[in-house]
Image (cartoon, grey):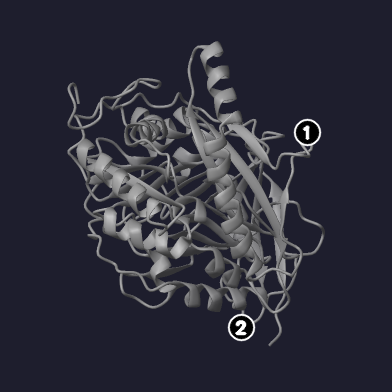
Amino acid sequence: MSSQLRVCLKPAQARPSVAAAVRAVARCREPVVLDSAAVGLPASRYTILACEPTAVLETPPGGPDPFVALQQVCRSASGCGALSGGLSLPFVGGWIGYLAYEAGRYIESLPASTVRDIDLPVARFSFYPAAAVHDAHTGSWTVVAARTGGQDACPWDPRPTDRLDFYQQLLAEAAGLEQETPAAVLHPSPEEHNLSFDQYLRMVQAAREYIAAGDVFQVNLARRETLAPQEPPVDTYLRLRQANPGAYAAFLAWGCSAARQPTPDLRAILCSSPELFLQMDGTGQVATRPIKGTRPRSCDPRIDAALRTELAVSAKDRAELAMIVDLERNDLGRVCEYGSVRVRCPADSPAWPYELESHATVHHLVATVTGRLAAGRDRIDLLRACFPGGSITGAPKVRAMEIIDELEPTQRSVYTGAIGFLGLDGSMVLNIAIRTLIVDGRKIHLHAGGGIVADSQPFAEYEETVAKARGLRAALGLEAAGAVPCPPGRPGA
């Protein structure tokens, strides 16, 4: 039987803050928030909020290929037909979830010698046939639900009107929850590090030796801190989006209520990523925005400006980004039309294809690479061709991933994977899951990493991870925003 997708939408009657709406949805089953919290950046406009999914697609460690499973359900969704009416909303229903970094082992044959000590699936996507969408430009909310006909292709939601009413009520309840971001619950010192300070320095030096030997040009390495959460994850997330807002932030939780104290069953992802991994619209236009090059922010405007200038003129950082841009062009070229892959130059700098973005705790260099998907290819082909993102592996990608597996002691899980959605209209938006906290029952994990190149200095690389982790640590109450912690294994740590 043929089927057709229709979208029902209404302006929301209530206009709560995004923070209040996040707090309200956290009380529901399996809440998700795809959050453009970094207001002021070009990409920061829409926030998508949903709960109560009607289906779950989960890949346990060693389970079936998650890319095959996603391709099957997304082909089913594409049979629902195209949207009509020129809707401008970014999401009208679809699959929301994540792919862990280790999903890359379904694409490439890798050693898999790291220890798995975070108990989350390799991939987990849930189907949300309805959502509430916030527009930061207007301050308004829209509730949207997909109506699907047919008995085979898209049987997920025969009652879109009921779902519209549900989200109207949820936003109305959120309007009564307006309150300040919760104060930090002070944590004790981190329970453990997967690498001591000296071990981290040795890991960076080992990477430099691989680079000197010609194995790779660049390899991305990370360290991890682990502690016990002291509060509901939604409270931590609300502070995170304030302390370190990201254009591609996300909050996902399942297993038990995200609004209650953690239990052994709770799983949650709290992400404030600034980096777009992949974006594709329903017409096949594709974009990726790799980030490479970092300087910390300073509360002194003169020092902050000097750090920004230092990054802008740094030959090392430009070269580091150029390597990843070449890698991303090659990845896109595997599935895009010949000749369509381009590096977009900013309008104010047509001779220089990079942009310098300033975020809450760091400055970054960013590039935008675009293309058009080739005929006969779909968005999962695109995802498989590019995953994991080159900015968090290094180049060449496969050899860099082998070195990561050798040098890092533990699996990354969601960190440096991808979080986002695959919409019923054929669209896809996925971030690079950096600046991310992972809640695994009564443990919470914090990662920070960076790209290592030939002239990297181990202690400077450690300091870069400190700058990147600062917003996460502030959200956890480990330090005041802007404070510089001592490294583990050094005096005062």
| Residue beneath the point at 45% across and 28% down | 243
Against 247, residue 430 (above or below) is below
Q: Amino acid at mark 1?
A: Asp
Residue annotated with mark 2: 151
Q: Which mark is residue 424?
A: none
- Disc 1 packing (10 Å; few <14; some 14–19; many ≥20): few
Q: Work out how far the residue at label 1 is from the one at label 2, CA to CA, in angstroms.
A: 52 Å
**Between 160 and 438, which is closer to the camera in this rendering?**
438
Q: In screen coordinates, is 323 left or right of 345?
A: left
Give the SS element for disc 2. Answer: loop
Residue annotated with mark 1: 348
| Residue beneath the point at 37% across and 31% down | 460
| Residue beneath the point at 25% across and 60% down | 114
**Between 340 and 93, which is closer to the camera in this rendering?**
340
Residue 126 x %, y %: 47, 63
Q: Amino acid at mark 2?
A: Gln
| Residue beneath the point at 81% across and 57% down | 86
Give the SS element for disc 1. Answer: loop
The C terminus - image quarter:
top left
Residue 5 x %, y %: 70, 70
Against 339, residue 376 (above or below) is below
Residue 251 x %, y %: 45, 46
Q: Can see residue 98?
A: yes
